Image: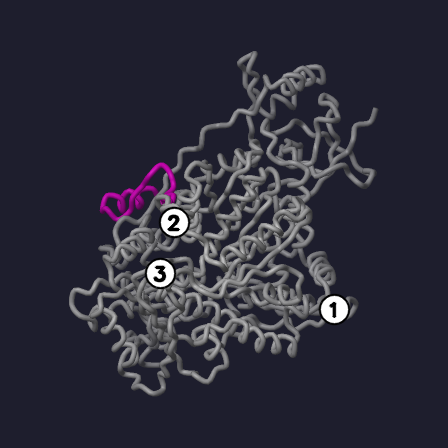
Amino acid sequence: MKSACWDVAIISAPFATLTYELPDCFPTSFWHAGLVVVVPMGKGYRIGVLLGPSRVEPSGFRVRTVLWPACSRDCLDEKYMALLQDLALRQSQLPGRVLANVLPRFLKDAKPVFLDRHAGTQLTISALAHLDASARKGLADKWLAGTMIRKYAAPRAEKYCYVVQDPPWPIRPNAMRQWDILHYLWENRGASWSQVRKHVPGVSTKILESLAAKGLVGVRSAPYEPEPPPPRACTDAFPLSSEQQQGLETLTRLLHKPAPATCLVHGVTGSGKTRVYLELARVCLERGQRVLLLAPEVAIALQLFAEAKGFFPDGEVLLYHGYQAAQTREATFARMAEDAAPLLVVGTRSALFLPGPDPGLIILDEEHDGSFKQDERLVYHAKEVGYYRVQRSNGLLVLGSATPDMKTFYAAREEDIGVVSMTSRIGRTTLPEIRLVDLKAFPAHAGPFAAPCLEELNKALAAGDQIIIMHNRRGYAPVLYCEDCGEPAQCSHCKISLTYHKDVNRMVCHYCGFTRPFPMICDHCGGSIFQPVGAGTEKLEEFLIKSLPQGTGIARLDRDSSRRQGQMEQILEAFAKGQQQVLVGTQMLSKGHHFPGVTLVVVVDGDLGLNLPDYRATERTFQLLVQVAGRAGRGEKPGKVLIQTRNPEHHCWGFIKNNDYTGFFDQEIQLRKRFGYPPFVKLGLLRVSYPLEWKEGSDRLQEVSEVIRNQASRLGLRVLGPAPAPLQVLRGRLRFQCLIKAANWPAIRQLFAAVDHHFGRDRHLRFTYDLDPLNML
């Protein structure tokens, strides 16, 4: 009898989908989609995942046979595989590449070892391959009986390095390798030694030991894992407000419907959305279904986890995010696959790919946040994956925000999804007063703050209140100009201005990580005197220390100040306890934080991001400023927000001052309709890049353009480009992009597939295919 042929997705390069026969030593019922297997490929063996019976009868080549199941844990079922295959199809990705990005390490080990419990012997892949049919049948019987299993090796010993001392560092300017290691660890908040060797050329263990001996670098045997805050006091002792109760009743009805549903929870900042989420989670858990509560960032996820632990003191609440140790994530992944018990998992977007029964309830807090979309490697949006998971469980997808994504709000307006509105803050707190400060009316030499802002800062401090100052630009100065020739200092890999970081006395590219010591020699004229222009959070902190009353506690929270392990948690905790009066930071401060002592928020430059070449620029500015304004007045005292701007006539300011999301939406949606942008069209972005030094690049780009134009004409698409990307040179590559507008997604996918078919094997060209792009730079 001829063995069945199944498609297998290889989960390492080249990530191909290949056809294999199933071995006769296992019964047919043993095989199922999602089973991880060892297969022969070339002269060796690879790990793959069964996708399903092959739809095409193999002919013209010899079909090889699956060697053995690779895992004794049955972690992936057919529903889970269907989800990943759908995602691969929608994103024009190979299933193997999708699996490689979402599966944990223990399922991808390329050299599994098997243990015969009765005989006490171990078998390698090579040993299994040399057994005859009779011996394999005997081992298959043992596998089915559970007496032969996969042996999971102890995690490989690895050094994890992290920066111990804050800059400036006492390192000689010419000790370039030491500088490179320190900067890489500083930028990445620590890393394994193997990662350092991979990304920092020319390093050695001796250099690491030297840095450790100087007390600059620490070495540990496990990666740093942010410690979740302790459970917060249970909030269910306080009665729900009328809006919370009405919202919960609406959501509960949707949860009990025998059909999948999506609902927007549109609530102003401080309206008590988290309490509604947890009450709804309780209903779902009591029904015996799982719940995913997701946040866009780890810091917000940790806070939600603390609230969930306090709300469910006797229930089991799991945490899952990318900063956890690999062993922690793998244990949670295996637990979710093997245990069907109703659980609440709090995490970031990656938690959507946990296996097991599809959740009955998925909640995306701050659903408008761009961090819910992954743009690298596997491109996907958490809303999309969440939608497909609740479709399979007849569950409920809840999208919560004070400033929803306009497409989400449009869907609610069109009654494609439900909506719950929460227009008031809980308790006696009210929304803050928001005022604009026109910078044109004040002299430029007054520093980064206009006079009204300095006056309000001193008033708030005199009253014993706390202050948040938000400026979405880190470093000391974003540009340094040569005083001799006027040219800015630029990154040699990206042709973008280098940012001056005074604390480490270096110039840094915020796109590729390239650094240069300061002072330096001008690349254009050989000059050595540079003038810093503009201000980052470092400069603001320095100015405030000099300008505010002596003894004022001032802290800074940005990517630089929170790189050392545990530093972000320490800064936030100290501010929450009132140990600091002023907190300066980037957009990390804008959402999810609850500081009752804050009565004043100052936005240093409200125009940042407003004029970017992106149709979402105004929407993002509105969302960011409304969210950061929501940090003020959450306690007993009313709040005040000051936004500095050079363009007070822009149409968005009136809506921000009045916290009028609906009015903003009504005006902005008309512009989208007039110019043909989502939600009125489907949008795709095709990016192509090639090395700067490649002489044939422009000719090859013309060939790509011709294929795009031909396909667009055939499919009836509107195409803009290819044109130089706003960031035209990045990491040593010339970048071009093409914006595609269509009436449906399949047409865009067909164009992507045609381009990939023609040029996918070109080793110089690199393509990114992005459906519904969030980043246009």
| Amino acid type of the residue that numbered disc 1 sits on in the rendered structure | Ala
Single out the mark in the foreground, 2 or 3.
3
Q: Are marks 2 and 3 in contact (CB under 8 Å)?
A: no
**Residue under numbered circle 3:** 558
Single out the mark in the foreground, 1 or 3.
3
Instruction: Tell me if I can see residue 693 in this picture.
Output: no
Rendered residue at 33%/73% (across/down): 535
**How far is disc 2 from disc 3 in space, using C-alphas?**
30 Å
**How far is disc 1 from disc 2 in space, using C-alphas?**
47 Å
Is 203 magenta? The answer is yes
Give residue 756's quadrant in the image: bottom right
Residue 712 numbered mark, or none:
1
Instruction: Tell me if I can see residue 305 in this picture.
Output: yes
Q: In the rendered view, would you say 567 is above or below 727?
A: above
Q: Are marks 1 and 2 in contact (CB under 8 Å)?
A: no
Is 92 magenta? The answer is no
Rendered residue at 34%/87% (across/down): 441
Q: Does label 1 or label 2 sit earlier along the sequence? A: 2
**Residue under numbered circle 2:** 202
Single out the mark in the foreground, 1 or 2.
1
Please provide the residue range marked out in magenta.
201-228
As helix, strand or loop, the secondary structure at mark 1 comes to helix
Q: Does label 1 or label 3 sit earlier along the sequence? A: 3
**Where residue 385 appears, x then y in whole percent?**
61, 51
Q: Residues within 10 Å of mark 1 (few under 14, many from 20)?
A: many
Q: Is residue 608 left or right of residue 663?
A: left
Q: Does label 2 or label 3 sit earlier along the sequence? A: 2
**Where residue 89 appears, x then y in whole percent?**
69, 51
Quarter of the image with the N terminus is top right
**Where residue 69 appears, x then y in whole percent?**
64, 28
Toward the top, the furthest residue is: 119
